[in-house]
Amino acid sequence: MKPKKNKKRNRDRSRPNATFPASYLLGSRVRVKSGTTVPDFRDIPLGGWVGTIVELDQRSNPPTYLIEWDKHTLDHMHPVYRNRCERDGLTLESMWLAETDLELNNGGPVVIEQPTHLVTRPLSKHDPEDRIRAIFALTSDDALPPANSENVRRYARYLATQLSFPFQAEIIVEPEPFTLKACPITVVGLLGVEDCDEEDGVLCKVERPGQSTAVPLAALEMRKRSQQCQLVHDYSYWFANWSVEEFATSVGVPPLLFDDDNESASVGKLLGGIVLVGLFGAIYGAVLGSLLGVVEGTLTGVLVGAGILGSLGLMVGSQTRPLDADGKRIPYGSLTDVILGSLGGVLSGGMIGAMVVAFAGTLLGVVLGALLGGVLRRFGLTRINLFGTAVFGAVVGAVVLAYYRDHQTALLWATHGLWVGGIPAMFLMLGLSLFLRSGASQRWTLE
């Protein structure tokens, strides 16, 4: 959108170093004389407009003033003037006027003149907003309509008669986090008008070797200058900037839509994640196993902690409403949150319950861990988190307590805990990854 500006009238500046006496002071309340028109739009009268002088230019002859309009004037401005200011990037709230156009506001009744014969400029084929106005049979004085369902479908009917298929385009995808890539596609047609709405706009069918899907037309990228490109760009500009919402978010595309070129990298990251989760699961199992085998009452603490925090995680997960970049519900999103919330609550609750039972070692470990973290930070290791070192100390303290009481039994149970915790964790990570991938890839896939 063009930057808003204030325009001054061109006045006599034959004496650039001279100043001319001003009849009005800054802060004066003034009224525009009857018969005066807007300098930029001669068919819009200004008579009766009231405002306050906020800036003065005495180099002009006569002097010019920047008038900031009062609320009554702003409320009674003609809609056409508002639309023109928005269209041309002019400031609505103020205007530069010459001294001869003004008079002091005496506080009497205010009668704001209204236009009687508007002169609408012709639409320009070089202006994208005018080209959009032509589609909706509007004039240059009309504001562009909102991108609601009715207008989107009307635009879809127009595009169906103007676009020629197939044509080449690109779509931006996110094959991996924080990585964007332009993927070439072939657009083979538009979906039916009944499939269009204000959330996704016009949908088009695209193809890529071995894959056919539907994506929002506004998500296409076209670099080659052509009539096709202009039609798509005009639509995307309108749909993004005249959304029914206060502001439009960018039209998102499923991250896994066209990631076959990065399949090996994705598989590598997935395997790395599975191994990492398996390692954490093994450590978790070893710690919990050593405590279960030696410290009396650990099983009760595990069950109580897992039950309390697991229920809390279930409630939190069931209340989430995950949205994607388009503001639409992510497939399987809430179910995933319920699973993750419950699982996270059970695992963390079980470990907390076990460490509460082994409080003798846990408390000592927390103190030593916090002290160690503080010493490391004093040596410049600012990334060391005191909370993290305290938790690490609590875990180590509980394990040391178990080994102190019966190191043979603790070692045996820890060995069993390694594979009991590690192997299920890897399978769980694999299953959850496949589940999320299948849900994310189904959103725009055509049946």
Image (cartoon, helix red, strand yellow):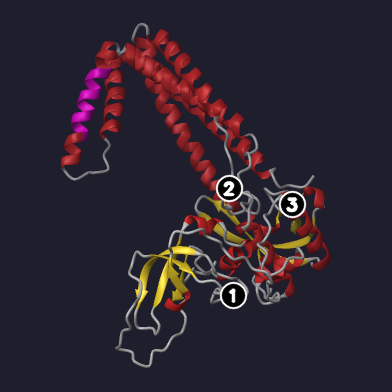
Horizontal relation, residue 243 to residue 382: left or right: right
Instruction: Name the residue that disc number 1 marks.
Output: 41
Residue count near mark 1 (Cα–Cα under 10 Å), binned few <14, some 14–19, many ≥20: few
Q: Which secondary structure, mark 3?
A: strand
| Residue that carries the numbered disc 3 in the rendered image | 213
Identity, as a three-letter code, of the amino acid under mark 1:
Phe
Check residue 370 for magenta coloring: yes
**Mark 3, mark 1: which one is toward the viewer?**
1
Q: Earlier in the sequence, mark 1 or mark 2?
A: 1
Amino acid tagged 3: Thr
- Determine the CA span between mark 2 and mark 3: 18 Å
The location of residue 236, given as percent across then percent down, is 66, 61
Is 404 situated above or below 431? above
Q: What's the residue at 47%, 75% (across, down)?
A: 101
Earlier along the polypeptide chain: callout 2 or callout 3? Answer: 3
Is residue 416 shown in magenta?
Answer: no
Regarding residue 212, the answer to whether it shows in the image is: no
